[in-house]
Amino acid sequence: MDSLGPDDPPEVGGYRLLARLGAGGMGRVYLGRDERGRTVAVKVVHPELARDPEFRSRFRHEVAAARRVGGAWTAPVLDADTESAAPWLATGYVPGPTLREVVARHGPLPEDSALALAGGLARALQAVHACGLVHRDLKPSNVLVTLDGPRVIDFGIARSLDAAVATRTGAVLGSPGFMSPEQVMGQRMTPAGDVFCLGAVLAYAAGGREPFSRDGGSMHAVMFRIAHEEPDLDGLPERVRQVAEACLAKSPDARPAPDGILALLPGEPADPWLPAAVTADIGRSAARLLELQAPAYAPRPPAPPPGPPPFPPGVQGRPGRPGGRRLPTPAYLAGGALVTVLVLVLALLIRMEREREPNVPAADGAATAPAGRTRPQERARSAGGVPEAMVGSWEGRSTASGTRERWLRRVTLLPGPVGGAAGTLWSVTDDTLCESRLTLVSAGADSVELRSRTVRSVPAGACGGGSRWTMTAAGDGTLNGSAGSLAMPFTKAAGDRVPERYQGRWWASVGRPVAGGTAPPARKVFEISAGTVGTEAVKITVTGNGDRCQGAAVLVSVEPAIVFFSTRVLEGDCALGGMQRITPDAQNGGLNWEALRSGQNGGLQRG
């Protein structure tokens, strides 16, 4: 989101513009508000393109198609003018990043989130196809990720089911990498083509790469693979792979319909459906949106209507003609904007209180909460919430006296009100992982009392139901935490994302003790993705003596070492090591691995 420039209009079609959301070859997209304070996205076509009759016809079709679909899985069309010198389209603003942005920032989605994405996209296609349309350009940048599910946008090349394919010679309608074989070969598109694109989007979301671009190459090389080669689905979780394979069948007749995709999914998606870091990003974006103000400018007074008013006295509305200017109403603008702020803040607080998603801090460890009309520290004091200086993620480490048991605790504190959700707590030992949700019991100027409730225990039943924690600011930038007889210091967490130096595939040779001696060493492979704390960012595979075992591990800390805990077995029958950590090797510039429970350790090699 960028500030408006001198060449940007202050208003389009009665919508007051606040910022520029993006720009491309087609035109510019702005963030705006109408006279009642509703936030909108306004797409304005470049004037030079508007002079192209074929392009203008395509834009008219996009507006008509988007109007026909509407519904819960797309951005609703509010208004448009397809005939002006610079045609424009206004839709409801969807507060969320694109799927491409999510994967670029946070890495591939975990399995449950990817399956929930597939369900949302299938329902969106049901709505599109029920209107007699084929989208034809379903791709990650046309999927917006929101707290309530995905939204499909951009119907620029959608076509009616009975429309013939008519393009200029050599023109490609679609996006290489996310096209169907029918598009590549210039054949007539059917709803099955959208299903193929859904499979490619799903593979990208769960694997972090396009399924037909494994070796790079030109656009034509990618299109050849789409038409003639199998997709690269290596590394996808098994359930995701099954859905993607079904959608990516070369023959349209072999692909499931959207309702068939839903039948392949494991029931209703979990709530929350997104990883915590993605939810935090959406929350920060909402906070910036609430604080955004329109640039000051002198509005032009509306010209008086030449005839009788278009509506009876006392009835609000707008003339029924394309592109007609809205009559700005200052009272509605001020009051509507305030209502929008209050509703959005209330909605975010309700989501936190219902614990729909454990929020996490920004990459620098500082959590951000939705802001209204007051500064954060003023809001925290007035609501009796967590003091501003304590908001964020904190980590504490200790070794229990007289034992080899080591603890790592990570607490994320949010600026919620007393009685509401206040964050998350991870407690990890050599062989136990406990994830808890926190509720704020009371708050003072420099301390808070929290109640924890266990939501995940590995092994099952090892964590108990919860406990009471007191966190107090020590005055030196640290926190003192206590629960019963336990007391430990917490320092600000360095971040929440796997540093690039750890990402990739690493392996070590480990010994395997047996009765009477040792067996030949096993090979232990770590596949580390660009994930965030709280996600299964590490996959562990152990092979040796004809055996193979694979499992997933959840990330619990990222600096100065990455620390993870084996949470579940994906293949085979073995124990995968409990809490483990990977640290930089200062001597040779490589990495060292250690399993804290077994004491196994060794240097890691790439590959």
Image (tube, rainbow, N blue to C red):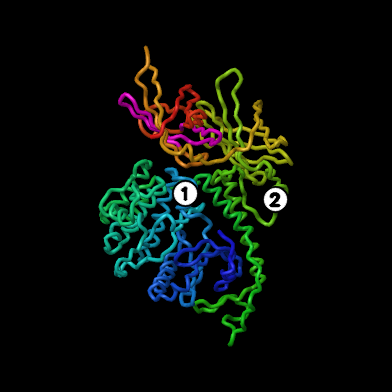
Task: State the extent of the magenta-drawn residues as a range.
Answer: 538-566
The circle on residue 104 is: 1
Q: Which of 592 and 527 is in front in this view?
A: 592
Would you say the magenta stretch is mainly helix, strand or loop?
strand
Query: Marks 1 and 2: in contact by CB < 8 Å?
Result: no
Q: Which of 433 and 197 is in front in this view?
A: 197
Position of the N terminus by quadrant: bottom right
Residue type at mark 2: give it. Answer: Arg
| Residue 340 in view (yes/no) | yes
Disc 2 versus disc 1: distance between alpha carbons? 33 Å
Residue 233 lies in quadrant: top left
Location of the C terminus (image quadrant): top left
Q: Which of marks 2 and 1 is in front?
A: 1
Give the residue at x 51% y 32%. Answer: 563
Name the residue carrying label 2.
379
Q: What element carries label 2?
A: helix
**In the image, what residue occupies the spot 73% across and 41% down?**
444
Mark 1 falls on what kind of element?
helix
